[in-house]
Image (cartoon, rainbow, N blue to C red):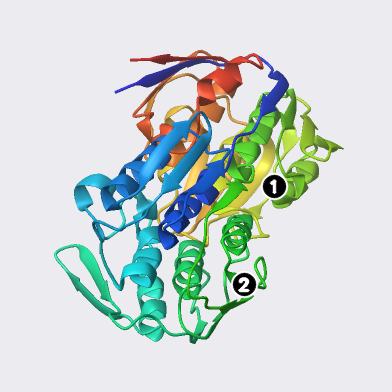
């Protein structure tokens, strides 16, 4: 397995371009199953989860042509309605093909999601919604089996809790259902809005994307489309924190500044200078020492759970006590123990972490436990004294494309070792 070797100390300076959003590209790829015409998706990040989803779609019946960051998918016929465990065990987004398969073929057999071990996934919300749309659901041997031989029908669905993939899955199921579907307490994330924008290009009738209430009027057939994926707000946020933790001067280019608004607010409170330098760029100029600022993760537009680990690494270098509260996933503090190996002063109390800073971090051998925990260890290593070796970096490869190259271009001393 590959490792990262990082020598801490250098102040990051320069510009980092942001790629397309993994969390937007995955549902967009699944949406290509809804039509027998070609769908072209641009700005697709070349990360492990995307390659896994692409292999799954090919198994299902898609013909895929890849040209750099562009994927053209053509699915004239569904040859298999199954997403097998062997293929999707490393990727929690496997459930995103459930809605499209049931909507187009009337049946689906999908392995329960895998991926990071950061807490329970509310797959029951997907299933309850599909049942309300008329599907029969059966679960056995680690698989979800859904059948709707007479097709799906519109319904009013209220999510008991906000779920991004659940919202995406049911939007894709509802676009081919008979009648009108209303999703209440829907996720408002930019990735949901981006999926809906693609579906509208394909001929779907959707109103309210980006709000908590989404109206969908089903159509008989969707057609092909050409769509460019939005920028990855989590990658943008990670590199903003990289600039902050090294006291650097970093410009994040090709991003959507409003999508990182909650993080920018915290960085400003902490004492960093954050400036929108253009329609698609943000600059951070950080002092050597920041102030500690509490944070609570929330659904968008609140502070993203996918930036919590990175923010905790930053708070180990801030002056004072910061309380980090995780409300989305119940097991998302596994990085705290590894940060403590590097010298961080962190106490866990249930769903909150109490971070006392500044701590003098020193290089150590650490192990990445999940995607975003990996990123937090990279950030801590950039600020640590000495050399850090991070093992199991395949986790970070699931969601970041060549993170080591992007950090190296702004002065980070990081290299990948096989």
Identity of the residue drawn at 29% across and 53% down: 60
In this rendering, the answer to whether 149 lies above or below 264 is: below
Q: Is residue 204 left or right of residue 389?
A: right
Q: How many marks?
A: 2
Q: Which residue is mark 2?
A: 206
Examine the image and state in which quarter residue 238 appears: top right
SS class, disc 2: strand
Residue 352, image x, y percentages: 52, 56
Q: Which corner quadrant holds the C terminus?
A: top left
Residue marked by disc 1: 263
Name which residue lies at 64% across and 54% down: 303
Q: Position of residue 124 (x, y in %)?
A: 35, 73
Identify the residue shown where x is 45% and y is 50%. Answer: 29
**Residue 348 shown left or right of residue 208 in the figure:** left
Badge 2 or badge 1: first in the primary sequence: 2
Residue drawn at point x = 73 percent, y = 31 percent = 253
Q: Position of residue 291 (x, y in %)?
A: 74, 39
């Amino acid at each position: 397995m590959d490792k990262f070797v990082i020598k801490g100390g250098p102040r990051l300076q320069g510009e980092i371009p942001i790629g397309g959003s993994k969390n937007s590209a995955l549902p967009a790829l699944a949406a290509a199953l809804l039509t027998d015409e070609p769908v072209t998706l641009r700005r697709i990040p070349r990360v492990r989860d995307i390659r896994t989803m692409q292999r799954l779609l090919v198994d299902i019946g898609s013909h895929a042509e890849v040209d750099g960051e562009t994927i053209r998918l053509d699915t004239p016929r569904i040859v298999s309605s199954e997403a097998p465990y062997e293929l999707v065990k490393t990727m929690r987004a496997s459930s995103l093909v459930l809605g499209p398969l049931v909507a187009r073929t009337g049946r689906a057999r999908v392995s329960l999601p895998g991926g990071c071990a950061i807490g329970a996934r509310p797959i029951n919300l997907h299933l309850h919604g599909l049942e309300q749309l008329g599907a029969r659901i059966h679960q056995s041997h680690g698989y979800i089996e859904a059948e709707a031989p007479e097709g799906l029908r519109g319904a009013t669905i209220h999510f008991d809790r906000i779920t991004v993939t659940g919202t995406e899955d049911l939007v894709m199921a509802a676009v081919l259902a008979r009648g009108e579907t209303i999703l209440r307490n829907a996720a408002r994330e930019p990735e949901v809005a981006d999926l809906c924008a693609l579906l509208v290009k394909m001929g779907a009738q959707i109103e309210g994307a980006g709000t908590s209430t989404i109206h969908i009027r089903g159509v008989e057939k969707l057609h092909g489309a050409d769509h460019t994926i939005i920028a990855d707000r989590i990658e943008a946020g990670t590199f903003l924190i990289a600039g902050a933790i090294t006291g650097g001067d970093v410009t994040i280019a090709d991003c959507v500044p409003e999508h990182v608004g909650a993080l920018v607010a915290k960085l400003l409170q902490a004492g960093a200078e954050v400036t929108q330098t253009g329609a698609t760029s943000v600059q951070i100029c950080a002092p050597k020492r920041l102030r500690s600022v509490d944070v609570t993760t929330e659904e968008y537009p609140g502070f993203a759970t996918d930036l919590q680990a990175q923010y905790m690494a930053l708070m180990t270098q801030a002056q004072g006590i910061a309380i980090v509260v995780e409300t989305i996933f119940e097991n998302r503090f596994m990085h705290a123990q590894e940060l403590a190996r590097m010298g961080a002063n962190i106490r866990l109390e249930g769903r909150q972490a109490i971070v006392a800073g500044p701590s003098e971090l020193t290089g150590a051998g650490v192990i990445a436990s999940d995607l975003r925990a990996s990123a937090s260890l990279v950030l801590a290593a950039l600020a640590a004294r000495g050399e850090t070796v991070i093992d199991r970096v395949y986790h970070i490869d699931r969601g970041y494309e060549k993170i080591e190259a992007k950090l190296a271009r702004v002065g980070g001393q990081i290299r990948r070792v096989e």
